[in-house]
Image: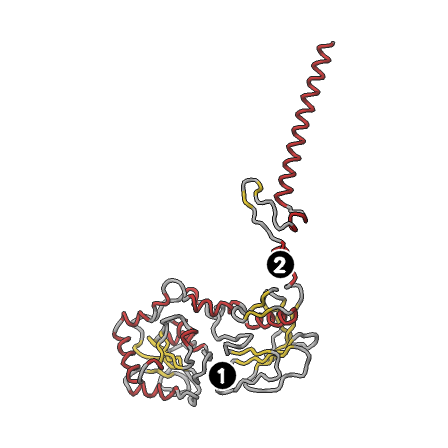
Amino acid sequence: MAVHGNMTIRYMVLYLVAYGSVLLYFHNLMNVEEKGLRHTVDELTSGKVEAKIYSDEVRRHTVDEVKRAKVEAKIYSDEVRVWSTMGYNRVEPCDVKCVYTTSTADVDAYVYELRGRRAPRTTDKVTVYLQLEGAHYYPIDTTGWTVESTYRWQSPILVAYFSFGGYTNFIGKNSPVSFDAIDGVSFLARNCNSKNHRERIITRLIDLGIRVDSMSACLHNAPKPPGNDDKVRIMQHYKFHAAFENGNVDDYVTEKVYLALKAGTIPIYYGASNIDSFVPSGSIIRVDQFESLEELASHLKECMANKSLYDSYHAWRQGELDPQFVKKFNFTHASTECRTCRWIYARRHNYTWRHDIQHFQLK
C-alpha cells in the first residue's frame, strides 16, 4: 500500500509539473503575441517600441509619427463643396472629400471659368478665377478674387494643358511616326488672325517648298484623310506637325504640342519662349531657334532625307521619360478640380500650400 501510495504521489507531481509547463508555454506565447501586435501607451510615448520580436525587425515609431498619423487621419474627415460655372454635379476623385454641385446651398467656394476680367461674386466664400485662354486675348485681372487658377505658372492652382491622366501614351511613349510617312507638315487651325501671325510662317514655308497640308479653316488647302476627324490620327500621316500657338506668351503651352507628341510626329513649335521646360528634352523643332525661315525650311528638308537626324527627335521616347518633365507635371495625376478642393481645404485649416506639388503641407 505504501508503494502504491508513493507511486500515486509521484504521478501527481509529474502531472503538476507537466501541467505547469504547458501553462507557462501558453503564457509566454500570449506574451510574445501581445508584444508583437500591440504597443502600450508607455512604449509609444517613450518614442520607440520594441525593435525585435521573433526574428524580424519592427520599425520604430516616434511620438511625432504617432501624432502625424492622427493628423493625417483627420485631414480627410471634412468635406469641401464647390459650385462651378461648368455645371459639374459629382464627387471628384480626390484625397480630400471633394464635391462639385450645381446647388449654391452650403458651398465653400465658387469657381468661375472666365475669358477676361469680371468682378467676383459678392460672398464670404472662396472665389476662384479660372481661365485657360491666353492673356494676349483675354487679359487676366484677379483683383478682388480669392485665388487664381490659370495656365500661368505662378498661379496658386495651376491649370496645365498637359496631364498624365489625359495623355497616357506619355507613360508608354508610343512609337514614332514611320519614316515612310508623308514628307510634309500637317496644320490644323481655325483662327487665321493670330496675335503672332503664325499663318504668315505657314505661307512662307509653302513658298520655300515645304509641303504644308492645312486641313482646317485657316489657310485650308487640303482635305482631311478619309474617315479621319481625330487630330491625332490626322497627324500620324505626316512626319511633322505645325504646333503653332495663336500668341507668343510664356507658360501658354496648349494641347497642340502635346497632341503632336502623342501622335508620334515631330512638332514644329511656335509660341511660348519657355517651351523647353514644358516638353521632353529634344522632342521638338523650335521656329525661333533658326535665324530665318529659309534655314528652318532647309532643316526640315534635311530631316526628311536623313533618317538618323529624323530619329534624333524621337530619342526621348527611348528609356525613362525625361525626369525634369515628370517632376514638372507630376501634380497632374490629380485633376484641377481635386487640387482646387485641396487648396480650399488648406485655407480652411491654415495649412501651407506647396505650389510645386499642388498640395498642402501639414504643420
* Numbered circles on residues, count: 2
| Residue 170 in the image, given as x and y percentages of width and height | 43, 67
Secondary structure beneath label 2 = helix
Q: Secondary structure at mark 1?
A: loop
Callout 1 environment at 10 Å: few (<14), some (14 to 19), or many (20+)?
A: many
Q: Residue at x 56, y 46 (%)?
A: 58
Instruction: Kindly identify which residue carries mark 2.
Output: 68
> With respect to residue 11, does 283 lie above or below?
below
Across and down, in percent, residue 324 comes to 43, 68
Q: CA distance from mark 1 to mark 2?
A: 41 Å
Residue 1 placed where, x, y %? 74, 9
The image quarter in which residue 130 lies = bottom right
Q: Residue at x 71, y 16 (%)?
A: 8
Which residue carries the number 1 mark?
Answer: 134
Please state, as top left, top right, bottom left or bottom right, where the C terminus lies in the image: bottom right
Q: What residue do we see at 37% from left, 80% from top?
A: 242
Q: Is residue 360 left or right of residue 176?
A: right
Q: Position of residue 34 (x, y in %)?
A: 65, 42
Give the number of the disc on residue 19: none
Q: Closest to the observer: 56 or 177?
A: 56
Q: Residue at the far front: name it.
A: 46
User: Residue 6: which quarter of the image?
Assistant: top right
Amino acid carrying label 1: it is Gly
Q: Relative to the observer, which residue lies in front, 15 or 86? A: 15
What colour scheme has been applied to the protein in the rendered image? secondary structure
Which amino acid, mark 2? Arg
Q: Is residue 262 left or right of residue 310?
A: right
